Amino acid sequence: MKCKKILSLLAAFTITSSLLVGCGTSSSSSGSSGSSKKVKISIMNSKGEIQSQLEEAVKTFSKANPNITIDVVACSAGQPPFEKLSTMYSSQNAPALAIVDPGDVIKFKDKFADLSNEKWVKDAQEGSLDTVKLDGKTMGFPLTVEGDGIIYNKKVLDKAGVDPTKIKTTNDLEEAFKKVQATGVAPVALSPMDWSLGSHFFGTSYATQSKDSKDNAKFLDDLKAGKVNLAQNKQFNGLIATLDVLKKYNIDKGDALAATYEKDQQYIGEGKVGFWFMGNWAWPQIKQFSGDNKDFGFIPVPVSNNADDYGNSGIAVGVTKYIGLDKTNNNADQQAAAKKFLNWLVYDKDGQDIMVNKASIITAFKNITLAPNDPLSKSIKDHMNSKNTIEFMTVLPSDHGTKVGAAMQKYVGNKEDKAALANEIQAYWKTVK
């Protein structure tokens, strides 16, 4: 994923580098720190929409653990976590904990500590650690399970006589848009951020190549090798056909690239549009505008006009953020304090409450019985329970969002056609090492 471009929530933080003096204690699997030694650590946050909730979490944790102080360091707007963390390592000022994208764990595996002996590893949901199992070691803590698709405001759809469960194809989606439009409401908002268009939306074309993630990985390898002609690829053409429908009925189609995340979350929340392509991470912002209306959910992004085609009934779901623990810039006491905080998130009722109820996170741990209390997370859980999901393409190159996103922006802004889009994306993949 990326550092979320959520300007309204990102606060400016200055990291305080404060390494401890004196003897260090060896870190234990329980993550306990010395009972009297003052320890100061930091967390790099690349998930901007939970900035305030994360600040609340560290304050609550420190009240119960007064000898441990935690600073929260936010990524700058638009800054990939890989870039931010690389800069911090270059200045020998790495945080004890870093919230990063799945692919970043692989890149920093020599910097991150092995967490295999932590208690929460055994309580992690099946498959949630697969991406960060490297050389037989567990190199990351699964922070959040997320999903994306087309969000709908059910009150708008009810007024238009649209049943979201009946939308199975691209044609079905357009018919729903027409019905919403007939009520005087704009059908859909299409956000033009590169990470949304490039990684999330276009990622659907990769994820729907096959039910088998290994086949999807091979498809990406074939793209790198120049063996794929996207212009002739069924999933690419189907997804772009759906994008054409989104463009046609977009509330901001007159100046599509001027749309913003902040405006679009307000549109869907206030019912000024019926649909919006985005993920469940947007709920904390949507609810600020939705009032008493909590009737929202997801439909998949259709990729064809055959309802039985793979992908037409599934939304993308996966672990989208991991936390890595530094072992090079932080001493044994700091590492132990960091482990204690991770355990607190999983096993303490206050930690669980902040994650699930305050931050609207779908956790990756079997022992956490709190159910999501927001409608988008509930919708994702329903899709998970019914096994109507597709792979969330979490291990894409770090520059995929910016490069493919830029190409997608040209297409959305009518600055290049589909053939040029396919060529530009193919050319990008040939540069990937």
Image (cartoon, rainbow, N blue to C red):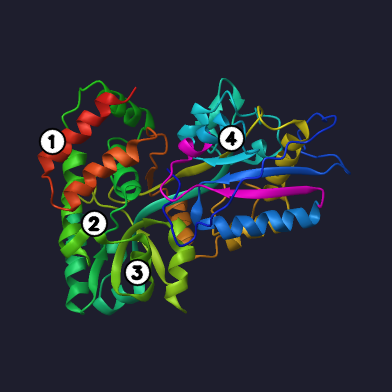
Nearer to the camera, 46 or 234? 46
Nearest to the eye among marks 1 and 2: give it.
2
Nearer to the camera, 143 or 175? 143
Residue marked by disc 3: 268
Residue marked by disc 1: 231
Mark earlier in primary sequence (1, 3): 1
Nearer to the camera, 231 or 44? 44
Report helix, strand or loop for mark 1: helix
Mark earlier in primary sequence (1, 2): 1
Question: Where does residue 126 sit, x and y in percent of width and height?
Answer: 55, 38
In the rendered structure, which amino acid carries the disc numbered 3? Ile
| Quarter occupied by residue 178 | bottom left
Nearest to the eye among marks 3 and 2: give it.
2
In the rendered structure, which amino acid carries the disc numbered 2? Leu
Q: Are marks 3 and 4 in contact (CB under 8 Å)?
A: no
Binning the other alpha carbons within 10 Å of mark 2 as few (below 14), some (14 to 19) or many (20 upward) gives: some
Report helix, strand or loop for mark 4: loop
Question: Where does residue 355 sit, x and y in percent of width and height?
Answer: 61, 56
In the rendered structure, which amino acid carries the disc numbered 1? Ala
- The Cα atoms of the two marked residues, 1 and 2, are separated by 24 Å
In the rendered structure, which amino acid carries the disc numbered 4? Gly
Nearest to the eye among marks 2 and 4: give it.
2
Residue marked by disc 4: 140
Residue 257: numbered disc: 2
> Looking at the figure, which quarter contains the N terminus?
top left
| Quarter occupied by residue 93 | top right
- Residue found 32% across the figure and 41% down from its top: 402
Mark earlier in primary sequence (3, 4): 4
- The Cα atoms of the two marked residues, 3 and 2, are separated by 18 Å
